[in-house]
């Protein structure tokens, strides 16, 4: 059994660092670099760059590992992306996206700081302690060579931790018998994720598909008629998050808690800095 303090710390670590990983997906540098290697502008760069560590996989694998995207959206871009650029080319472009994005958002003083170097060391230790059985997306990332620049070591480490947690989250969602769209509807209903309009647009679910998912959730007693979660729905979401925290906690047992707490505090500082520099567009997240 994993100690409850470790599980709580895993949750706080995710919240402190996830935005620093995901900012590359909203970065204008992304389109520039992915188009430069041959991909089409728009969503193709996201699907190809995030799935490229697994190789030239098909749309079914990408939809399964990304989970809450409409498979029709995935199929618009995969496998077409692999005919335009190889996974190796796309991954090199991704490093450039991460480099340029972090430099723009954090500034050279942070990039070259001893504090970031220390945080990168702790994050890398945590990433190295991960196990990857049953975690295909994280395993693909674990097979990549480590970069040498400090800020990219930091970004790769928190990306590994994020995908490790994300694969565990999918395990929890499958256990809860929530489909991809149902997971998205219930998470949006908590008020802690995407705004509903953004969730539909970014994951390409139609109003009709969204309504059908809501109807299924109402039939299970998880959603009220006004789209809010019932008491049972709230309990299920709490259980899913608790399971996700537990499944992500394993690597934290390998690193001193004071060092992890330092990484959490510094991650919060960097997240505020990145958000203040415009890392994310308005009207996407509920909070």
Image: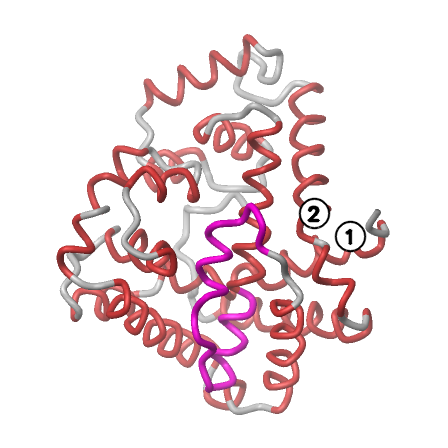
At a point 53% along the width and 25% down the height, the residue shown is: 178
| Structural distance between the alpha carbons of marks 1 and 2 | 7 Å
**Residue 205: percent from left, percent from top:** 33, 30
Q: Residue furthest top?
A: 219
Quick one: SS at disc 2? Answer: helix
Local crowd at mark 2 within 10 Å, few (<14), some, or many (≥20)?
Answer: many
Answer with the quarter of the image where residue 273 lies.
Answer: bottom right
> Which SS class for mark 1?
helix
152 is higher (above) or lower (below) than 179: below
Region of the chain picked out in magenta, as a range: 132-158
Q: Quadrant of residue 259?
A: bottom right
Vertical side of 250 occupied by 103: above or below: below
Residue 162 vertical placement versus 129 (above, below):
above
Tag 1 and tag 2, C-beta contact below 8 Å: yes
Between 52 and 239, the one lying in front of the other is 52
Which residue is painted at 77% across and 51% down in the image? 7
What residue is shown with label 1? 8
Magenta stretch: includes residue 148? yes
Q: Which residue is mark 2?
A: 245
Between discs 1 and 2, the one toward the N terminus = 1
Q: Is residue 199 left or right of residue 133?
A: left
């Amino acid at each position: 059994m994993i100690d409850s303090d470790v599980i709580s710390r895993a949750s706080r670590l995710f919240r402190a660092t996830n935005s620093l990983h995901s900012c590359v997906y909203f970065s204008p540098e992304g389109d520039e670099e992915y188009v430069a290697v041959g991909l089409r502008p728009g969503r193709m760069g996201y699907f190809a760059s995030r799935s490229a560590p697994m190789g030239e996989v098909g749309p079914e694998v990408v939809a399964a590992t990304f989970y809450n995207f409409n498979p029709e959206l995935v199929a618009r871009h995969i496998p077409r992306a692999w005919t335009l650029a190889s996974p190796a080319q796309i991954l090199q472009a991704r490093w450039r996206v991460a480099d340029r994005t972090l430099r723009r958002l954090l500034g050279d003083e942070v990039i070259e700081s001893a504090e970031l170097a220390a945080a990168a060391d702790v994050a890398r230790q945590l990433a190295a302690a991960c196990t990857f059985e049953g975690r295909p997306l994280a395993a693909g990332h674990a097979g990549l060579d480590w970069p040498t620049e400090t800020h990219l070591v930091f970004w790769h480490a928190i990306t590994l931790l994020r995908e490790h947690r994300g694969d565990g989250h999918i395990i929890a969602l499958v256990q809860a018998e929530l489909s991809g769209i149902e997971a998205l509807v219930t998470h949006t209903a908590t008020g802690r994720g995407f705004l509903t309009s953004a969730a539909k647009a970014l994951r390409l679910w139609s109003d009709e598909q969204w309504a059908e998912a809501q109807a299924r959730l109402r039939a299970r007693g998880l959603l009220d008629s006004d789209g809010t979660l019932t008491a049972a729905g709230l309990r299920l979401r709490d259980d899913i998050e608790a399971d996700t925290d537990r499944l992500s906690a394993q690597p934290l047992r390998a690193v001193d808690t004071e060092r992890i707490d330092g990484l959490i505090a510094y991650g919060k500082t960097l997240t505020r800095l990145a958000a203040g520099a415009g890392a994310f567009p308005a009207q996407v997240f509920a909070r």
